[in-house]
Image (cartoon, rainbow, N blue to C red):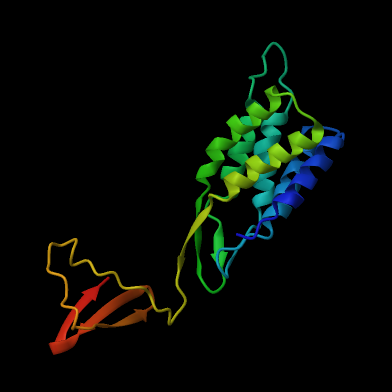
Amino acid sequence: MALDAGALEDAVRAILAASPANATEAANNWAGAYDDYCSGAMFGASTPTLTGKRAAFASTLAAAFAPVPPPAVPVPGTPAAAFGAAVAAYWTAVPVVGVQSGATNGCPGSASVPAALVALCVAPSTADLFAAGFAAALHAATLTVTATVSPPSGTVLPITDIRALLGLPEPRPARSARTLVLRDGALVAAVVVVPHGTVAFLK
């Protein structure tokens, strides 16, 4: 994924220097910064379709940023937890299109975001150090996003020799093997052809 952590840090610094009018505006500012940062994301030669994800990020934060009316007491760490939840929501079931198509599997690193942000808030810091730490926490989490994609038509896939795992004898050095990958829609079959007409199919 081609993500620019430096640009995200600059955006965080600008947000910290701003004075949003309300919780909704603040949430939208954060969502815009993260969405702009993610716009450069790549899965190999394919790209995630991020339509609507900015709104999902913003709505998750807005609920946490909203003032708590008395006599209720704000829960410490709620905004930090909301950032983790917002990153998780952003990367849930994102379509991936291009040479390889599929969808994201989520963002497991989002679970580490709240603790990282709380640590930033309690440690002595400057605005620049805080912005750098904040961006680093979001960047590290985002790098854990993965996607399950289908290889493009005609892709040659690696063949794994599993004879040792099955307790079968290793092939003799003098015997060579040729491989062929066949694909028909979602069906992919890897064929190993060895001398003397022996054929083994791996799925």
Q: Is residue 183 left or right of residue 20?
A: left
Q: Quadrant of residue 167?
A: bottom left
Q: Quadrant of residue 158?
A: bottom left
Q: Is residue 91 above or below residue 69?
A: below
> What's the residue at 33%, 81% (across, down)?
182
Q: Is residue 81 left or right of residue 15?
A: left
Q: Position of residue 113 (x, y in %)?
A: 59, 36
> What's the residue at 81%, 33% (across, down)?
127
Q: Position of residue 90 (x, y in %)?
A: 61, 48
Q: Is residue 141 left or right of residue 55?
A: left
Q: Quadrant of the N terminus?
A: bottom right
Q: Nearer the viewer, residue 102 or 193?
A: 193
Q: Is residue 152 above or below residue 84?
A: below
Q: Position of residue 179 (x, y in %)?
A: 29, 82
**In the current view of this chain or complex, which residue is farthest to the front?**
173
Q: Quadrant of residue 138?
A: top right
